[in-house]
Image: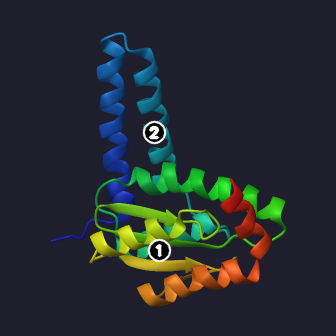
Amino acid sequence: MKQTTFRDNLRRYARIEGGRAAFFAERGHVKDAGEYARRAASLAVASAAPFEGKSAFHHIVRECDRIAWPDSYVADVVVHDRNHIKTMEREAKDAGRPLLFVWTVRDTGTHMIDPFKRDWFSWFAAIEKQTTSAAPYVFDGTELKQVSWARAREFCYDARRKYPATAQQAAAA
């Protein structure tokens, strides 16, 4: 039996989202149809892209390819994680620090944790508790590394200690 790859899942979900777009378009729900069509296009493009760059997003997609996860909710990676990374990149650039985050992946999706957000610890604790099969990773500005939950938590504390002004700005927001 052939193992399903992450890219296979991207193609499958692109077809599903395309079907949803058609469903809503047929019923005159233009806004919903447009949203599903955009997601379908993003998934289809991602399924064929090489992702050979050094960006955080490319690191994540290559890891998804390597471990063949997530099986479902693949839009988490291509839509939500990509958008979250873009936001964190802008914030890191404005703060004069490298892009740092914790990313977790499991068979049913992903989560991203920005150590500079005020509520990072509550998110971290909830994700760690609910996802026993999740694999935590840290992105240190240059590469994505799989680590233990304890090391991921320490990574967040270290980031906040190393860049305290950024952490204080997040706490004030």
Q: How is the image coloured?
A: rainbow
Determine the residue positioned at 47% across, 24% down.
Answer: 34
**In the displayed structure image, the side of residue 114 where residue 11 appears, left or right:** left
**In the displayed structure image, the side of residue 144 where residue 27 appears, left or right:** left
Q: Nearer the viewer, residue 72 or 162?
A: 162
Q: Quadrant of the N terminus?
A: bottom left
The x and y percentages for residue 115 are: 60, 71
The x and y percentages for residue 79 are: 50, 48
Q: Quadrant of residue 6?
A: bottom left
Determine the residue positioned at 52% across, 57% down.
Answer: 81
Three-letter residue code for mark 2: Arg
The residue labelled by disc 2 is 39
Determine the residue positioned at 41% across, 32% down.
Answer: 36
Outermost residue toward the front in this view: 172
Q: Is residue 162 above or below residue 13?
A: below
Q: Quadrant of residue 158?
A: bottom right
The residue labelled by disc 1 is 63
- Please count the marks in the image: 2
Q: Is residue 99 above or below residue 84?
A: below
